[in-house]
Image (cartoon, grey):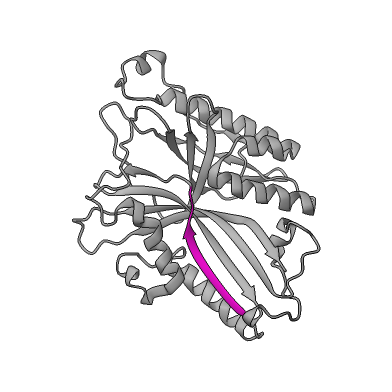
Amino acid sequence: MTLLTIQGCAPATPADADAITHPRHSVTLSTAQAVYRSYLGASDAAAAAGHAGQGLAAVSAAQWAQVKGQYTTLATAGTPVPRYRYSQPAFYVPALAGTPRWFVVAASRSTFTHGQLSAPVPTLLLFTQVNNIVPWTLSGSAVLDQPLPAIARDSDGYAVDVTTTDPSLLLRPDVVGATHAAVVDQGPASPAAAVVAAGPRTTGFFAAQSAQAAAEQAKGLRYSWLLQGSAFRQFELRLADGGALVLYTMYLNTTDEHPNLVAGAPIPVPAAFSPLLAVPTETGYHAVYANWTYEFAAIDPPAAASHAKLRVIGAQGAPAYGHAY
């Protein structure tokens, strides 16, 4: 959610290096490094003060939805906002002209708690600027559970972007989210499973939700879930092997209800969602709704790759909305 300090950050690119970059580079490498450092300072100041307004001003899109819920939950519990440290960052800045401007940073993240650092986890950070008059913000992040493949770079060292309709990939990027969702919602029996690799964020999500549904059914309740797309923009970078890294936002919506929504014994609200209820006294006599916001990172292989499948290599999710009635 928030960052502490930059450790081992590569020095800013000299001004003369920026001067020789291709003229279509709307974001230089040194600009990306400056944006990253600025974000680290702003987000850590907000975390240290426990100031939700300052913290939310530094984020947008999926990250805003996650951070909003986290600040609310932590404030309700009286828990300090966590602070993070990141290792040596790698910058992937696409050679683009115009807006929106964006770039990706890869680094290992450790949580700083009571003077101690947790084990680092590899993380991707997505920074965006919608237009010239709004500030840069962190719009998404994903913790990786698989290695990040090599990102393609041009002769100037800039990353290569991919269009959402690129036909050279196994899946057009604009259908990656929907194909992923089909496996989460329907499991290995879904036709989409033929092109989506099993893993904790695909078949694993299905298994976990199915187990929850069975447990609720044993209580006489009906539990359902749906992974669905969002209106937030997705971003893609070319991989060295011709595939693409796809970053996209999805919502996981769950419903726990009495059959036919008849009134019955109160359905417990999950602890993580209690602070997010619009009214603290909301009671689930009929149903309880919960919504997570997730940022996913997936590898879309080249269409010509033999037996390749879409691989979801990382994610970060947090409760964003709850309602009971």
| Picture layout, residue 152 above or below residue 176 | above
| In-front residue for pair 284/138 | 284
Q: In which quarter of the image is the C terminus?
A: bottom right
**x and y percent of residue 222 in the render?**
60, 80
What is the span of residues highlighted in magenta in the rendered image?
A: 222-231
Q: How many labels does the image show?
A: 0
Residue 246 falls left or right of residue 80: left
Residue name at image x 51 percent, y 67 percent: 226
Report the predominant secondary structure element of the magenta stretch: strand
Q: Quadrant of the N terminus?
A: top right
Residue name at image x 55 percent, y 74 percent: 224
**x and y percent of residue 309 in the render?**
30, 62
| In-front residue for pair 3/140 | 140
**x and y percent of residue 63 in the render?**
56, 45
Evaluate whether residue 117 shows in this view: no
Residue name at image x 64 percent, y 66 percent: 289
Inspect the magenta stretch and tell me whether residue 229 lies in it.
yes
Q: Quadrant of residue 237?
A: top left
Q: Quadrant of residue 116?
A: top right
Residue 316 falls left or right of residue 73: left
Q: Quadrant of residue 281?
A: bottom right
Residue 322 falls left or right of residue 228: right
| In-front residue for pair 56/211 | 56
Evaluate whether residue 128 shows in this view: yes
Residue 68 falls left or right of residue 175: right
